[in-house]
Image: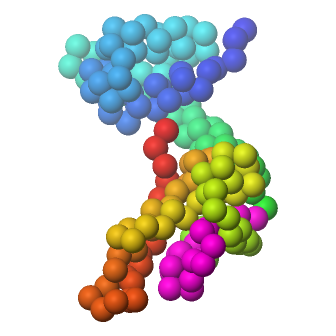
Amino acid sequence: MDQPVEMRELVHFVALAEDMHFSRAAERLGIAQPALSREISRLERRMGVQLFERTSRRVSLTQAGSVFLRESRKALAAVNGAVSRAQQAARPQRLVIAAPPGTGAAVLSPVLEAYRHSADPAPVQVLFTTDLAAGVRDGTADLALMCGTRAAVAMTTRGRRCLAVAASAGQRPGVRQVSAAWRTAGP
C-alpha cells in the first residue's frame, strides 16, 4: 500500500460496516451513494483486500473487513482522544471572570458553584471592571458576567465552553433567583 489510509476513509468504512447498506451509510455521511461505493472500492484496491461481500441484495463484512472494522474503531477513538487531550491542554490554567463592580455573592456564588461542578474546573479569579466586553476582547478575562435589572447573562467569547446565567428579581425586593449552567458552544 503506497498511500496511507485517510481518516475520512476510516469514517466512511465504519459507517458502511455499521449500516451494511450503501444508501443509508451515504445518507448518514452526507455524501452520494456512488461516491461512497467508489471510495470503498478504491480503499479495497489500495489495501489489496476485499472488505465487503456484495450481492444485489446485501452487503456483509469479510473476515478482513471485520478485523479492519475493529482496528478502525480503535484508530478513530485514539484520534478523538488525542484531540480531546490537546483541547484540555490548551485550556487556560485559570478562569478569569469579569464582573461589574458591586456584583454580590447572590449572583457570583451560584455561578462559581456551577463551574466548580463542571468537568476539570480551573481556579477562578474574579476581575471587577466597568468595561466587561473589553476585558474578554483583549484577553484580560475569559468570561464576562453581564448584569441588568431584569436578567444577567454570561458567556465566554473565547473558546467553546460558555456559561449561561439567568438572574431575575424575586417576588420580594432585593431577592434574586439565580441559575447557572455550563454548555458547549456551537461550532
Residue at the image point whose x is 60% and y is 78% from the top:
102
100 is within the stretch colored magenta: yes
Q: Residue at x 43, y 67 (%)?
A: 148
Q: Nearer the viewer, residue 63 or 30?
A: 30
Magenta residues, start to end? 94-115
Q: Is residue 161 magenta?
A: no
Quarter-wise, where is residue 23 in the image? top left
Q: Is residue 134 left or right of residue 65?
A: right
Q: Quadrant of residue 95?
A: bottom right
Q: Residue furthest bottom?
A: 172
Q: Is residue 179 left or right of residue 159?
A: left
Left or right: 186 in relation to 85: left
> Is 35 located above or below residue 22 in the figure?
above
- Which residue sits at x=64%, y=20%? 5
* x then y, percent, for residue 142: 67, 56
Q: How many marks?
A: 0
The reply to whether residue 88 is in sight is no
- Quarter of the figure with the N terminus: top right
Q: Residue furthest left?
A: 57
Instruction: Tell me residue 167's x, y (percent).
Output: 40, 74
> Would residue 32 be seen by someone viewing this image from the given angle?
yes
Q: Position of residue 115 (x, y in %)?
A: 58, 72
Q: How is the image coloured?
A: rainbow
Q: Is residue 16 above or below residue 128?
A: above
Residue nearest the observer in this picture, 23 or 178: 178
Q: Residue at x 47, y 59 (%)?
A: 183
Compared to residue 37, the image places residue 64 above or below, namely below
Q: Return the residue nearer the eye: 19 or 141.
A: 141
